[in-house]
Amino acid sequence: MLSPSARFSALALLAIVAPATIVAVLGYVSIRQWEASSELLYREQARDMAAMAAEKVEMTLRRSEDAFLDRIQAVLRSDAPPERAVDDVLAGAPLIRRLYLIGATGELVYPRAWKDGDQAVFGPLLTETAVRRLARDGKREVIANNQVCLALLTRRSGEPVVAAFVRDPDTLRREILETTLGTLESSTIIAVLDHEGRTVYSRAPIGDAQRLLSVGFRDGLPDWRLAVYQTAAGSPRQAVRRQVMLFTAALGVLVAVIVAGIVMTWRLMRRETEMARLKSDFVANVSHDLKTPLSVIRMFGETLEMGRVTDEGRRQEYYRVITREGERLSRLIDNVLDFSRIEGGRQTYDMTPTPVEPLIRSTLEAFAYPLAQQGFKVEVSVAPDLPDVTMDADAVGQALANLIDNAIKYSADERSLTVDARVADGRLVVAVSDRGLGIAPEEQAKIFEKFYRVGRSDTQGRRGSGVGLALVRHVAEAHGGDVAVESKPGAGSRFALRLPLSGA
Ligand code: ADP
């Protein structure tokens, strides 16, 4: 059969720890799912954003190139001599680095001559078929790794003219890429890579950021790509990790609080169980304590009654035993009654200035017989001219009697009792010392608790209820003082009752 506290622990484990574990597991699983889906969502958003940005770059580029081509077209349609007018248009279009206009038969319309070996680059591109294809499709073309753009224009006469131009990379970066991509709101880094994967433009230094994805541009920049990079701090994984840490910490605190609660309740229950045990021991101990002097009194009383004791000396001895056992009974009953009054908060103290020495002597007097019978060496040392101390003389006398009773009870071979009274640090100190069994250090605080008795075979053989020292402490504290113990197992104990001189 399990003890109540063990049953409680098992129940607590089942009722609290199990759900906490389930919550932890569910939380972990849902965070993992969330991590995966947020990663996916983040990627999708990044892809949408990248496609939109690429579109925007192309639109801006096309708009700016269209405006330029419109102006060239206007020149070709006008009467103006193309040479100067085209020069003017070019001067106002920094995006166009170089322009050639070629007629349908391959003749150079603008400028007069090829520059710096451009013919080698442009010539092969401007074959008749290419021009015809352009005329048929009626659109612009970007060829040779974004290097050369072709567009079909018409002269005033209606003849086709091919405009072949090269973009200026710096202007492209500054006026197209920077203006369109630089203003995008995003926690990622956006970069444009050329046909060899080199970074043409990036919104921020890429450093060790990870490439998330890249999308291609369309007709305007056919060989280039727009790439999205993710910094470690901005990644959704990092955010999830922070959440996981937060969740784990919160769960940890929760579990710690639950465990602390269980431990506290368990301790409380153990204390209650211990208290219940101590109480039942107390009842048994008190009954036993009452029984022993009663049977001695009865036995001696009956013997005397039967008139069998003829020797006067023996008779006197028997009377003394009866008186002594009667006194012990009274003391015991007083202890229990006082204790119950204290527990019920009904104990009152009658404080009057009391001379100390007579109180000590009369208390010791009550123990004269057992002390003498057991061969105790008694020493009383009371400092001369002790002042009267305000106290409840009965209560303090009883506390002192309990200390003396214990000194006698817990003595071993060396029977010695010292009572010592003096003023120290402005307080009256009455100390009762013995050279008896002594008390282990770990027990010294517990012996003042109610019902507590040191669970040792050598003390268990001695009678006692476990309330004596609890009463001493209560009396001391009610007087504004305290009780202290110094003890060494095997060497003896010294209990000091310390009371303020002026009373509480
Ligand atoms: P009890 O009725 O058991 O004597 P007390 O409250 O007076 O109850 O004392 C509590 C316990 O303290 C005792 O059971 C005993 O183990 C220990 N104790 C008290 N006085 C002494 C002493 N002078 N020497 C050794 N042990 C003592």
Image (cartoon, rainbow, N blue to C red):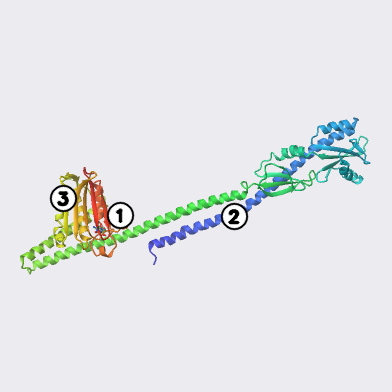
Residue 196: x %, y % from top left: 76, 48
- Measure how far apart labels 3 and 1 are at the Cα level: 28 Å
Quarter of the image where ligand 1 sits: bottom left
Exactly how many numbered labels are in the figure?
Answer: 3
Name the residue: 86% across, 43% down. 121
Q: Are marks 3 and 2 in contact (CB under 8 Å)?
A: no
Which one is in front, 368 or 3?
A: 368
Residue 469: x %, y % from top left: 25, 55
What secondary structure is marked by label 2? Answer: helix
- Compare marks 3 and 2 and give the one earlier in the sequence: 2
* Dot 1 alpha-carbon crowd within 10 angstroms: few under 14, some 14 to 19, many 20 or more: few
The residue type indicated by label 3 comes to: Leu
Name the residue: 51% across, 51% down. 249
**Which residue is disc 3 drawn over?**
359
The residue type indicated by label 2 comes to: Arg
Q: Is residue 93 left or right of residue 277?
A: right
Question: Is the C terminus in the top left, top right, bottom left or bottom right quadrant?
Answer: top left
- Measure how far apart labels 3 and 2 are at the Cα level: 80 Å
Q: Is residue 153 left or right of residue 272?
A: right
- Judged by depth in the image, the label closer to the viewer, 3 or 2, is 3
**Which residue is disc 1 drawn over?**
445
Question: Is the N terminus in the top left, top right, bottom left or bottom right quadrant?
Answer: bottom left
**Which residue is disc 2 drawn over?**
32
Residue 377: x %, y % from top left: 16, 58
